[in-house]
Image: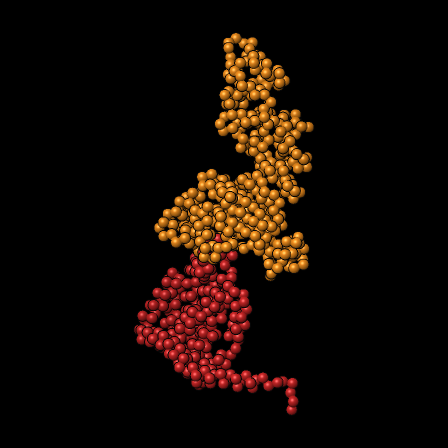
Amino acid sequence: MSLIEVRNVTKIFGADPKAMLTKVKAGMGKDELLAETGHTLGLHDVSLSIEKGEIFVIMGLSGSGKSTLIRHFNRLIDPTDGAIVIDGTDIMTLPTRDLEQFRRQKLSMVFQRFGLLPHRTVLDNVAYGLELRGIARAQRHETAMEWIDAVGLSGYENQYPSQLSGGMQQRVGLARALASNAEILLMDEAFSALDPLIRSQMQDQLIELQARLHKTIVFITHDLDEALRIGDRIAILKDGVLCQVGTPPEILLQPADDYVRAFVRDVNRARALSVDVVMQPPALRLTTENLDHALEEMRRVGESYGYVVERDRYRGVVTQEAIEDAIKAPGNDSLYDIAVETPHFGPETVIEHVLPATLESDWPVPVVGPDGSLAGVVSRSDMGQILGRDEEEAEPDDDAGDGKDEPARRQVGRDVAGAA
Amino acid sequence: MTSIFFDIGQPIRKATNDFVDFLVVDYGDFFEAVSNSILSVLVSLERVLRDAPPWLVLIVIGLIAYGASRRAGLSIAMVVATWFIGALGLWEQAMQTIAIMLVSVLLAIVIGIPIGVSAARSNRFRAIVNPVLDLMQTIPSFVYLIPAAMLFGLGKVPAILATVIYATPPLIRLTDLGIRQVDVEVVEAARAFGATRWQILKGVQIPLALPSIMQGINQTMMMALAMVVIASMIGARGVGETVLLGLQRNDSGTGLIGGIAIVVLAIVFDRISQSFGDRLQAYRKVHH
């Protein structure tokens, strides 16, 4: 069972939400409901499962209901209908006192505008969750100091929030959330108020911390690039309705409807996707050491190059020409020795980093797994296909090499490489 | 002669008088007990202030001013201002006024802050309280001084009552406003971390509303001082009495001296409470 289960949650804002529920269930839309009854449909029949240890991103534009949805997880907002089950507990059944206890133990939260207590120092802000849990002063300060250190704010612990920059304040917010040691971290547009550069630093820091802590993170954002960068899975909300839930490549490459398609149109895929999404099996995998056998194989397949693999480990690329030269030359060369080690990349590398090498290389660029095996290869045309799906979709700065103008682009790639 | 006006005034007049008579006859003991407890606090405070040698009072005022502001200049100015009242020949009266004012302000705080907090939490309660506050601030004091004098007798206690009725509304309003203006995201953060309502009130809302609440206390002090002349009319002693004497004897000089003393007292209380309020929110002033 998933850690967080949201079951058929509907939220209606207004004077008499319960009465409006039947109308909504009968199919009345958001605009109609607002025009006829003055009630706002915040969420409509949303169901989600969030697994332990994942970063689950809920994304949508303003008014999509994403901030409303995240506030249901700790019942800052109660649903009009539906259930929220966290770790087996239906939190709707909790009386106030148990709910407060539940919030202290299970969930912590980071806010868009930080939500720090302005009259408390950084140290006391970070220790706040522990203080509510009744942990003694000395001990909570010790724990708080560790987390202040972990987010890189040592030396600032006696400052007040107003003395810090936005990015530093949000690190205090993050440290406060982490210090409570709750299993679930709710992040409501946590990085949206920050400068782009600071935002990307914070994203890196979050990913880094998550690799160590394995929390379950529910992250709200309106920025698709951010969602794709940090999310293990992404849910897209529109007008309180869930459009699609999927991994970043699924969202980008198989949008469920026109809304998601329009949404992902402007995404820089070169930055959002990793090479394992585009890579193909190599045309020719040479596993023999024998030069003659290799040449034979090459002629049979009709390729002028091949990828040399020695006992599942990638060794390099050889061309037909090189094998022929080696056979003619004296000495008993092994295929492994004449394989040329060309640039290769891990499967998690984003396409953007692989692109120059692909353009420069005469053959598809090999992708090598962490165990050293040849996972696949990426060719210029693979790149072209994924980046240039639709002419009008491609970004002007996308260095996409699609079929037509490939030679020209290749030339540019070479020139750049030559200059470097 | 027939009139378009029904006579509503007469029944109200009669009902009110009957009600006051009823209170006086049936609950006289209760009101006396309330009166006595307030009086005992007031009398002992007054005795302390009047019995203490003036130099000691001046030193204490200097220390309080310094404690509140951490500014030597301001503290010295406050001591000089208070000395000036003594030099006007109104030391005794000033001590009486200070005693009445402090007790009134204390009562106003005890009553006003909880009502202000409740008003901030409930729109319904606020809708009930607001017109009552309007009434308290606009109705002429003499209207409630008549029954108050009947219930508590002439003297200090009805004076304190009148002062509290007049001076509490700004504190209630500013407490309400201050708590409503606390950043909702900060309150939400406290809730999200599992704070109880009381923890939110005590640890977040009241500390963050403190500038506003302090402003309310300051206003209460100023309005309490504005009441001293009226209070003296029902027998409260103090600088108000000096003004009243000037009025009764057609003695402009005495009236002016009393008036100056009230203004100087107002300045002393205002400066000390304002700088204390400023220091409480020092965290707002520091910027990188």
User: Looking at this view, is B277 or A235 the one in front?
Assistant: A235
Q: How is the image coloured?
A: by chain
The letter of the red chain is: B
Q: Is residue A381 visible?
A: yes
Q: Looking at the image, how many numbered discs can be counted on the residues?
A: 0
Residue B237, image quadrant: bottom left
Residue B185 location, x and y as percent?
51, 54
Please tell me which residue is depicted at 39% across the width and 63% down the height of the picture: B68
Q: Residue furthest top?
A: A330
Residue A218 percent across, percent down from the top left? 52, 45
**Nearer-the-camera pick, B163 or A80:** A80
Above or below, comparing residue B151 to residue A290 in the picture: below
- Please give the name of the residue rendered at 51% of the width and 10% of the height, measured from the top-left corner: A332
Q: Residue at x 62, y 48 (%)?
A: A241
Residue A325 vertical placement versus B198 (above, below): above
Could you say which is closer to the camera, residue A90 or residue B287? A90
Q: Which chain is orange?
A: A
Vertical relation: B240 (above or below) A380: below
Q: Reply above or below: B134 against A341.
A: below
User: Residue B130: horizontal and vertical position, in percent?
Assistant: 53, 70
Question: Is residue A151 shown left or right of residue A47?
Answer: left
Which residue is located at x 54 percent, y 27 percent?
A375
Q: Quadrant of the C terminus of chain A?
A: top right
Residue A38 drawn at (x, y percent): 64, 59
- Horizontally, residue B21 falls left or right of residue A225, namely left
**Residue B85 visible:** no
